[in-house]
Image (spheres, helix red, strand yellow):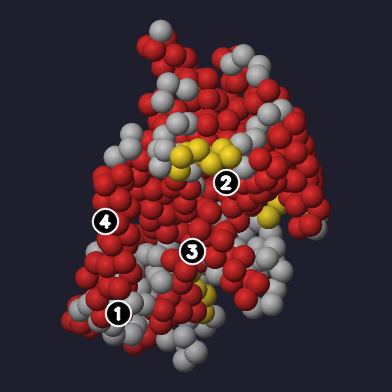
């Protein structure tokens, strides 16, 4: 029987992934049709060009269809279907028209009450063998948990693939815990959340082709919160309350710090800012992919410790958490020293290097790093900024920035490299691609060109 259950869980995960993956392109077309486009208007956004959102609709469809196929309808399913449908509708409206944060909060409280009406309530927790019942506080505490986790997943959605990947890792940790405790019905629901996230992730990873938007972030947060209440909080583990706090530790801590920070500065806790953990990693010199992978690792470490808590291996869980954050602290301290950054092998640049790469051409008109100057016969100067990962070498510039094309007339203009305009740079700072570009630019063209002596070109390469 156990093998059959595990096969069903695996099949549900795969089906949800396939449906989400196959549905995402159509959802992307729909986003363009209804105007659900995220246009970068402030410094918080990491992308530089409009990206369609409402990708969470594909996640919702993948979960609903796969759960209807493999699961029996229970009150928990009713809570997820009804509440999920409402929050997805609110998310789509917000992704198109940007509704007020308090209206979204009211909707979140409403769907939390739907879950409570279906019996999804935190009635007690096990604290080292002592059962603590909440009595009249059970319903308010449940609503606080559901609304809090729903917002936590939404607020962490700041980089390509971050919220989707974190949700997949959290859900997989939750799935593992449920399987270990023999809660196969809850595990099956959780597997479909994992599959839906994995099916959508290829379109959402950097450079993202579509964002999940509030449509997906709110639905995932709500669904995982309901599943956690119906599964984890009812376990008879000695410290069952630590399991969900460990699994969702990353989004919970990020949200808690964001609310505290905003209130301390006299702002609304729902006002947007650029102080989240992923923003801090970007400011430290990591690019989007590196920042997301670091947060994936932290989330995975916390999920592993939750599994140890489930089996009541408290010492092992503490070792995992302490060692993980000790490693993170050591790396952080190294990154604080600019002279040690390049020795880490992560292709990080200091803040000044990032500004230089983003500036492109310097004020004196000379050639700056990563830029090829193409002069025409008429004397006009055009630039082609090379923005790919290979040449930028992790400069912190987002990968989705498009490079400008060099516009040259083959009939009247030729591309030539002026050796006097090339700046000398240090060995560590100058990319190898610049030297290769110099050789390519020196090849004969159809029009006149200025020859550069071999000795001079050799000095410039050095």
Whole-Å distance between the Cαs marked 2 and 4? 36 Å
The quarter holding residue 334 reads bottom left
Q: Which residue is mark 2?
A: 209
Q: Residues within 10 Å of mark 4 (few under 14, many from 20)?
A: few
Q: Nearer the viewer, residue 77 or 453?
A: 77
Asked if residue 86 is positioned above or below residue 334 in the image, the reply reads above
Residue 356 in picture, x, y percent from top left: 43, 80
Tag 4 secondary structure: helix
Name the residue tied to disc 3: 277
Query: Whole-Å distance between the Cαs marked 2 and 3?
Result: 23 Å
Tell whether label 3 touches label 1 (CB within 8 Å): no
Measure the C-alpha gap from mark 4 to mark 3. Answer: 20 Å
Q: Position of residue 57 (x, y in %)?
A: 67, 36
Q: Position of residue 31 (x, y in %)?
A: 72, 43
Nearest the viewer among 380 and 221 is: 221
The correct choice, above or below, for 386 with respect to 169 in the image is: below
Mark 2 nearby-residue class (10 Å; few <14, some 14–19, many ≥20)? some
Task: Check residue 337 in the rendering and tell me which mark sits there, or answer none.
Answer: 1
Question: Mark 4 sits on what residue?
Answer: 323
Q: Secondary structure at mark 1?
A: loop
Give the crowd class for mark 1: few <14, some 14-19, many >=20 residues within 10 Å. Answer: few
The nearer-to-camera label among 2 and 3 is: 3
The picture places residue 270, in percent across and down from the top left corner, at: 69, 63
Asked if the residues shown at circle 4 and circle 3 are in contact, with their CB atoms under 8 angstroms apart, the answer is: no
Q: Secondary structure at mark 3?
A: helix
Question: Of label 4 and label 1, which has the lower sequence position?
Answer: 4
Q: Nearer the viewer, mark 2 or mark 4?
A: 4
**Residue at the (66%, 40%) spot, across then down:** 135
SS under mark 2: loop
């Amino acid at each position: 029987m156990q093998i059959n259950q595990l096969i069903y869980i695996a099949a549900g995960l795969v089906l949800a992934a396939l449906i989400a993956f196959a549905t995402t392109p159509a959802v992307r077309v729909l986003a363009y049709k209804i105007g659900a486009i995220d246009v970068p208007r402030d410094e918080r956004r990491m992308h530089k060009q409009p990206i369609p959102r409402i990708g969470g609709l594909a996640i919702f469809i993948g979960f609903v269809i796969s759960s209807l196929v493999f699961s029996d309808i229970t009150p928990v399913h009713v809570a997820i279907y009804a509440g999920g449908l409402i929050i997805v509708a609110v998310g789509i409206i917000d992704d198109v028209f940007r509704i007020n944060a308090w209206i979204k909060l009211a909707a979140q409280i409403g769907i939390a009450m739907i879950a409570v009406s279906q019996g999804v309530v935190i009635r007690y927790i096990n604290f080292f063998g002592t059962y603590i019942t909440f009595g009249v506080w059970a319903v308010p505490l449940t609503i606080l948990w559901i609304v809090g986790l729903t917002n936590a997943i939404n607020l962490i959605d700041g980089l390509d693939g971050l919220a989707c990947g974190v949700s997949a890792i959290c859900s997989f940790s939750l799935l593992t815990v449920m399987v270990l405790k023999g809660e196969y019905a809850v595990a099956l629901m959780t597997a479909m959340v994992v599959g839906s996230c994995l099916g959508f992730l290829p379109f959402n990873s950097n450079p993202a082709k579509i964002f999940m938007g509030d449509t997906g972030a709110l639905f995932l947060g709500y669904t995982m919160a309901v599943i956690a209440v119906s599964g984890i909080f009812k376990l008879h583990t000695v410290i069952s309350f630590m399991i969900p706090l460990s699994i969702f530790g990353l989004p919970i801590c990020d949200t808690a710090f964001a609310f505290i920070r905003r209130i301390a500065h006299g702002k609304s806790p729902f006002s947007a800012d650029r102080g989240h953990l992923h923003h801090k990693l970007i400011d430290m010199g990591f690019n989007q992919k590196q920042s997301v992978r670091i947060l994936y690792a932290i989330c995975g470490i916390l999920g592993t410790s939750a599994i140890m808590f489930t089996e009541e291996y408290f010492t092992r869980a503490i070792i995992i958490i302490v060692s993980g954050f000790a490693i993170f602290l050591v790396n952080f301290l190294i990154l604080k020293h600019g002279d040690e950054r390049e020795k880490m092998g992560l292709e990080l640049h200091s803040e000044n290097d990032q500004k230089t790469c983003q500036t492109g051409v310097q004020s004196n008109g000379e050639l700056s790093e990563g830029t090829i100057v193409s002069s025409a016969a008429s004397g006009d100067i055009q630039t082609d900024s090379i923005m790919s990962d290979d040449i930028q070498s992790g400069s912190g510039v987002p990968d989705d920035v498009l490079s400008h094309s060099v516009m040259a007339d083959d009939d009247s203009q030729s591309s030539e490299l002026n050796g006097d305009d090339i700046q000398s740079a240090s060995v560590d700072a100058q990319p190898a691609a610049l030297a290769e570009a110099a050789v390519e630019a020196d090849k004969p063209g159809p029009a006149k060109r200025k020859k550069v002596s071999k000795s001079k070109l050799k000095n410039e390469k050095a």
